[in-house]
Image (cartoon, helix red, strand yellow):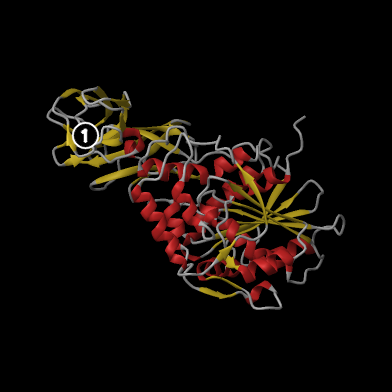
Amino acid sequence: MAPDPTTAQVTMTLAALAATGATPRPSGETLQQQTERIITGINAQLNDPGLATQGGWRLVWLALSEANANMAYIAQSTNGSNEFAVVARGTDADVTDILEDLDVGTVVPFPESGSPKPIAVSKGAMDAFKQVVNARSIASPSPNVTLTQALTAALNSAPSAPQPTVYLTGHSLGGCIATMLAPYLQAQTWPKQPKFAVITYAAPTAGVQSFVDYFNSVPWVIDERHNNAYDLVPHAWADLDTTAGWYPSPGPQATEEVQLLIGAISKRTKGNVYVQPGTLCPMNTSYTSLAKNLVNKTTQDFLGQVAFQHANSTYLDLVGAPAVPSAPVVTDVTPTFGEPGATVTIKGSGFSKDSMVDFGHFACPTHNIDSDSRITAKVPDGTGVVHVRVTNTLGTSPAVATGQFAYGGPAPVVVSAVSPTSGKAGTLVTISGSGFADGATVHFKDKASDSVTFVSTGQITATAPGQLDDHQTVNLTVTVGHATSPTSPADEFTYTGR
């Protein structure tokens, strides 16, 4: 028999489930359709005995705010422990977008906290909090009610013993919102007075010292702030500048571009001094959990490592919880160009019988799910170069360069790998990808290779040209006609000296 999961494993799993279906379908769907898709996905995962939640929770309420800006849900234990979880959703957006979108240049009062003294939080956190508490569910199991109304009804129908416990949890911005929901809910009057516990993951700060002083004075039964020591987001906004000196060996080290970016973002506080509430529980302090393929001193590797350190999957691993089921992933589209009506094969993972396919913003109504890793589709009407993406109840596949389709051609030019990944000037490098053609040019950063050999549409060889700095990592790009491959960590080549 598997050991009982820890509270951290359960709450982090519940926090991770909030990311289910967070991205609207690329071809468009109503708020009702997306809400129902999210509910279906979360229900399926709550029923999964293989997760840390062990199939012992049920969904009570869920609501998306307008324009899909925020989401929260309530789950109730079914094992007799009389526990409830109020879970706020973070975001799947780019980490720098998370920080740039949160308005921290202005602080505003937070009277909803129940504090007898005035306390202040950032305007961005306050806006997110209001969206969550004002959102009304538009689908079962509890339609047309707010969070507090749904929690009141759930507590009212719960047994009196043991005393109910309400966990406030969330990852990323969801954790930030949870630290505001906690005092707000704790200050309410409930039919059966519950105990309140606050457990957050990767949360940026919500408020200034006055908020923290009040938060820390509330008698929470649990008060834990779980942060990956090398996650940039929890350093916002108390000490974001410290992250410009990351990462320790083996890297990546922040480039000048990254340092300027972090410096510019940290100035968004406009002098407001933010403080983290609660009891810190640090993880990964020795930097043993890292994306080993993202360690070069490049902006892309640094931001890629930041995203890895912040990810739900990394936090689940750090607390020792099983991974939650992944949304679909598209790895390959064949052929990569053609006309509407053509047949293409989409390869990847996580495909299910309810999967839907989009070519850019155009829905693909004619497709067949051959297996969990292959879909055959008939190309819908469309124009230009688009990303082919797959959506099901767990989520939408991310847009990837190898999943592009070009209407009318030519094929998108993509570099998927280089070998070797390091060497001196003059090293012969094999470049793998797609869309290559005879006459293609290859650049190592801004230096053109003077020896390029076309092997096939998926392979080219090129000799690495000399650089002014012969100890640096550069992006390798292929140009065919007017099309140049986008850069990514997959096309990096590191010079090792002369």
Choose between 61 and 282: the one closer to the eye: 282
Quarter of the picture holding the C terminus: top left
The location of residue 271, given as percent across then percent down, is 48, 69
Outermost residue toward the right?
Answer: 161
Residue at figure coordinates x 51%, y 69% from the top left: 272
Residue at figure coordinates x 55%, y 51% from the top left: 38
Query: Crowding near pointer 1: few (<14 within 10 Å), some, many (20+)?
Result: some
Which picture quadrant has residue 316?
Answer: top right
Residue at figure coordinates x 46%, y 58% from the top left: 99
The amino acid on which the numbered mark 1 sits, given as a three-letter code, is Gln
Q: Is residue 273 above or below residue 99?
A: below
Q: Is residue 375 above or below residue 18?
A: above
Q: Secondary structure at mark 1?
A: loop
The location of residue 298, given as percent across then percent down, is 35, 41
The location of residue 396, given as percent across then percent down, is 45, 45
Q: Please say whether residue 362 is visible from this viewpoint.
A: no
Left/right placement of residue 466 relative to residue 185 reads: left
The location of residue 123, given as percent across then percent down, is 51, 71
Q: Which residue is mark 1?
A: 467
Residue at figure coordinates x 41%, y 35% from the top left: 368
